Structure formats: C-alpha cells, structure tokens
C-alpha cells in the first residue's frame, strides 16, 4: 500500500482516455487500495486512476468525510446508465491547483461498474455524489472540470497557472472539497 503523487494539469496524461480493466487481479486490488489511500491523504473526496498515472478505468469516491471509509465507493469500469435533472456545483480537483469553478452537471445519476470481486454493482447518487461520479468518470475520458467551463475562464486560469509555474513557487491547493 502506498500514497502516490497526484498528477497536475497541464500534465498530458490527464488528457488521455483510460482503458477498461479486462481482468480484476491482485494487482488491480492493490492499485484500488493505493488510489483510496492517496485520496484520503490528499485529502480529497474522489480520485481516478489516471490522476496517479495509471490509465485504467478505476474511480474511488468517499463524500462522507466525517466518517472516512464508511461509505467508500470503489468502481472498476464505471458507466453512467441514467442521468436526470441539472445542477450547478462549485468544483475543485486534486489535479487542478488553486482554482475552483461552477460546473453544470446532471443532478442525479445511476452508475454501474464492477467491484473488486468482479461483481456488477450499481450506485445511485444525487447532489455532491452525482457530481463526484460524473467528475471522476470524466477523468477516465481525459476530461477535467476546466474543460466544462467557458473558454475565457479557462484561458484566464491557464495564464495565471503559467505565471505561477514560472515563479517557481509551489502550487497552492484549491480551497474546499477536492474531487
Ligand atoms: Ni478531479
């Protein structure tokens, strides 16, 4: 088990599409555990495998930060089966330093995927859980929440980030919940 480092935008790996997991092996189970530990250490409420450089369709989510582990969700090959309604949520991401923005998402989603025993599981979520499920599945498709905001806002952020990187100072984390 290990806490791994989280890739940050503009790392090109974050733009890649992850591949489905064909067989859930001992290595997969260990990888899921590493993603969970890395998420809690960050701390964040969600993390996807590509954020630690593994292009596999695996996500973990735990929005119940007061009782860590109690409502932990681990999904292999997750897919959105149903999406309803609309909501706007102020999102941040462990891979996007020092920035949050309002993003429009479905209000309720039903997601199916596999657990570590290769059994099909269904997760229904609304509010923050729906946002987290959509945000993490976006990571598997090489998408960040900043790809879902206006071009103007994104350009303002990338300009600010470049300046920050040139200054050589460490990148500050964003305030609030990181997914
Ligand atoms: Ni994220």
Image (cartoon, grey):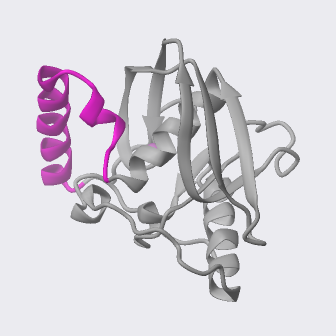
| Magenta highlight on residue 133 | no
Q: Main secondary structure of the magenta part?
A: helix
User: What percent of the width, then of the height, locates residue 127?
Assistant: 63, 20
Count of numbered circles in the view: 0
Residue 23: quadrant of the picture: bottom right
Boundaries of the magenta span:
142-168
Question: Is residue 85 left or right of 159 when viewed as pictured?
Answer: right
| Magenta highlight on residue 151 | yes
Q: Is residue 44 visible?
A: no
**In the image, residue 177 above or below residue 89:** below
Q: Nearer the viewer, residue 126 or 149?
A: 126
User: What percent of the width, then of the height, locates residue 104?
Assistant: 40, 18
Residue drawn at point x = 41 percent, y = 50 percent: 139
Residue 11: quadrant of the picture: bottom left
Q: Nearer the viewer, residue 47 or 123?
A: 123
Q: Nearer the viewer, residue 73 or 65?
A: 73
User: What percent of the width, then of the height, locates residue 137?
Assistant: 47, 47
Quadrant of the image where one finds ligand 1: top left
Question: Is residue 178 left or right of 121 when viewed as pictured?
Answer: left
Q: Is residue 117 visible?
A: yes
Question: Is residue 142 left or right of 126 when viewed as pictured?
Answer: left
**In the image, residue 162 above or below residue 11:** above
Residue drawn at point x = 16 percent, y = 38 percent: 158
Residue drawn at point x = 29 percent, y = 29 percent: 148
Image quadrant where one finds the N terminus? bottom right
Residue drawn at point x = 25 percent, y = 35 percent: 147
User: What percent of the width, then of the height, locates residue 8?
Assistant: 34, 56
Residue 60: quadrant of the picture: bottom right
């Amino acid at each position: 088990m290990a806490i791994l480092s989280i890739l940050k935008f503009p790392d090109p790996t974050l733009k890649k599409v992850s591949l489905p997991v064909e067989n859930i092996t001992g290595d997969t189970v260990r990888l899921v555990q590493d993603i969970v530990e890395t998420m809690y250490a960050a701390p964040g409420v969600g993390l996807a495998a590509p954020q630690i450089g593994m292009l596999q369709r695996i996500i973990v989510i735990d929005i119940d930060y007061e009782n860590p582990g109690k409502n932990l969700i681990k999904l292999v090959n997750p897919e959105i089966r149903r999406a309803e309604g609309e909501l706007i949520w102020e999102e941040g991401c462990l891979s996007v330093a020092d920035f949050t923005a309002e993003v429009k998402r479905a209000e309720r989603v039903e997601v199916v995927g596999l657990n570590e025993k290769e059994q099909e599981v269904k997760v229904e979520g609304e509010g923050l859980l729906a946002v987290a499920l959509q945000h993490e599945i976006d990571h598997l498709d090489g998408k960040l929440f900043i790809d879902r905001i206006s071009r103007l806002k994104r350009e303002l952020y990338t300009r600010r980030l470049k300046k920050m990187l040139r200054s050589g100072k460490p990148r500050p984390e964003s305030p609030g919940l990181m997914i």
